[in-house]
Amino acid sequence: MKKLVITGALALAFFANYNAQEKVAPKESTPAVAVNPNAAELKFEKETHDYGTIKQGADGNCEFKFKNTGKEPLIISNAQGSCGCTVPIWPKEPIKPGESSTIKVHYDTKRVGAISKSVTITSNAKNSPAVIKIKGLVEAAPAEEPFPTKKTDNGATPFEKTTTGFN
């Protein structure tokens, strides 16, 4: 009987502690961050570049032209490809209001198959982060023959086989 009372008391203490942990006060919501109405704004001419169908090893470069349509200088702090095969190059200097620039993107076309990649641009713009995309299809290059199929003598006299050997 004594063991039963002790077991019951331990179980009651366990569940009381468990319930106390469950009833944590709800977190207060974080206040909304005020957006600067004069902040820079990143406006792209196009947000997707379509390579179409290209051959393996083809030129994988493209450019995304953009304009700062805000009232303050635009500073791009980072541009990150969705994988290592997509490498962006962005302007490091501030882009003044009303000015344009480009973000260059290189895709490694040695990989065969569909292209569906993105580049995330982090900046001080009110529409940051911004995302641009590339798409297309890389076809395998035709396989080269390991040995030439056409025989050439290059001006040499060919051997002729006779019954006694080579002449």
Image: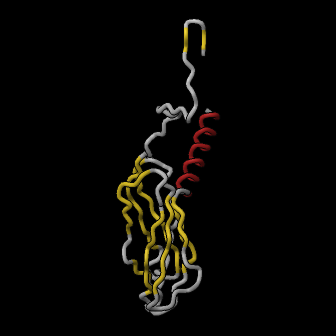
Q: Viewer-proximal residue, 17 or 125?
A: 125
Q: Viewer-proximal residue, 50 or 130?
A: 50
* Residue 22 visible, this orientation: no
Q: Which quadrant of the structure image shows residue 70?
A: bottom left
Q: Is residue 24 above or below residue 71?
A: above
Q: Is residue 85 above or below residue 95?
A: above
Residue positioned 47% across, 32% down in the render: 149
Residue positioned 55% across, 48% down in the render: 15
Where does the image place residue 37, in percent across and percent down from the top left? 43, 91
Where does the image place residue 2, in percent across and percent down from the top left? 64, 35
Q: Is residue 45 above or below residue 138?
A: below
Q: Which quadrant of the structure image shows residue 51?
A: bottom left
Q: Viewer-proximal residue, 76 or 111?
A: 111
Q: Which quadrant of the structure image shows residue 91?
A: bottom right
Where does the image place residue 123, in percent across and percent down from the top left? 52, 78
Quadrant showing the C terminus: top right
